[in-house]
Image (cartoon, grey):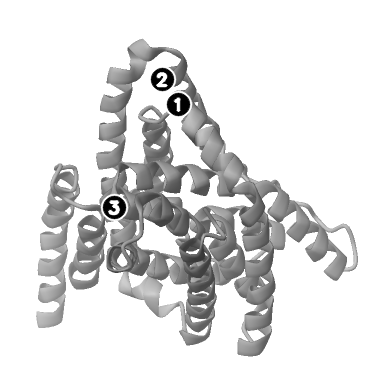
Amino acid sequence: MLELKAHSTLEKIALILMPVLALTSLLPDVSSATALMAGLIVSAIFGNPYIRVTRRYVSPLLQSSIIGLGAGMNLGVIGRVGAQGVGYTMVGISSTMALGWVLTRWLRIGSHTGTLISVGTAICGGSAIAAVAPVLQAKEQEVTVSLGTIFILNALALCVFPWIGTQLNLSQQAFGLWSALAIHDTSSVVGATMQYGAEALTVGTTLKLARALWIAPVALIISVIHARSQGSAGKRAAIKIPWFIFGFLAAAALVTVLPALQAPGQLMSMVAKRSLVLTLFLIGANLTPSALKKVGWRPLVHGILLWISVGGATLAAVKMGVIH
């Protein structure tokens, strides 16, 4: 009876605390890392009584925030940064997938789980996993484990990357490059670079979104390989294309072509930044203890080793000027 009462009390606290903290995350002084950690802590202690709602709104909030950020950027800068990143994006994705395959076999985890973690690391975290999972006909447990692994590392990156960048005295451009190449999800890339500076935000967001466009061709290649491994053409699932990226480009194009829209564009960008911080709070709140327990140590070790390898290699390349 006491346990039931205690549980009921915690739920009542969470029912009040979650909306209050969600609104608080919209305040200008609340950082993206603080919002994410607040969601994690509250969910771990009190639970998330709004789990269905928070999961439902993360994706549309993130997508609308990305489009809004485009209204505060120059299309010429976006084009230059995106074009510069094509070469090392191709190299980065292919080498990450190859290393992920090796780690999958070495750690003896399921091929679907290993592929999903690898593609999430190589391209853009949860979005890439969501696109490739139906192609592989992955089971719900495999998708949950993969997403849990990626989200844990996202939370860590959001806190650790700005600190490392400061310690190494990385320029804003260098930090934006590194973040886009080494942090899994677009939301965490934006959150980390937003803490570092305006130029880092532009470079990081642009390069990460350009990288996300590779979801479609990579998913198509994986579907062909999977079909051949099954011995037939198989049942092809539809590949999800991140259409919001084109919204980001359209918003930037409008503001660039029509100078009169620059002032409202900057306002929209400011609103989008706060919306993104709210999104990160919801992402943290979705990482419930039960979701974390499902991950297991082998997939987590796979994700950590792959992430350290990619992060270390790209950081070295940025520092040596190989990537610039």
| Crowd band around label 3 with a 10 angstrom C-alpha radius: few (<14), some (14–19), many (20+) | many
**Helix, strand or loop status at disc 1:** helix
Q: Position of residue 167 (x, y in %)?
A: 28, 68
Q: Position of residue 242 (x, y in %)?
A: 56, 41
State which tag comes first along the sequence, 1 or 3.
3
Distance Cα–Cα, label 2 vs label 1: 5 Å
For the residue pair 133 and 221, the one nearer the viewer reads as: 221
For the residue pair 313 and 122, the one nearer the viewer reads as: 313
State which tag comes first along the sequence, 3 or 2.
3
Seen at 16% across and 64% down, the residue is 11
The circle drawn on residue 255 is 2
Residue receiving disc 3 = 196
| Lateral position of residue 301 relative to residue 287, left or right | right
Distance Cα–Cα, label 1 vs label 3: 21 Å
Nearer the viewer's eye, disc 3 or disc 2?
3
**Helix, strand or loop status at disc 3:** helix
Seen at 90% across and 68% down, the residue is 231
Residue receiving disc 1 = 252
Residue type for callout 2: Val
> Is residue 196 placed above or below 116 in the rendered structure?
above
Residue type for callout 3: Tyr
The answer, for residue 248, to whether it is visible in the render is: yes
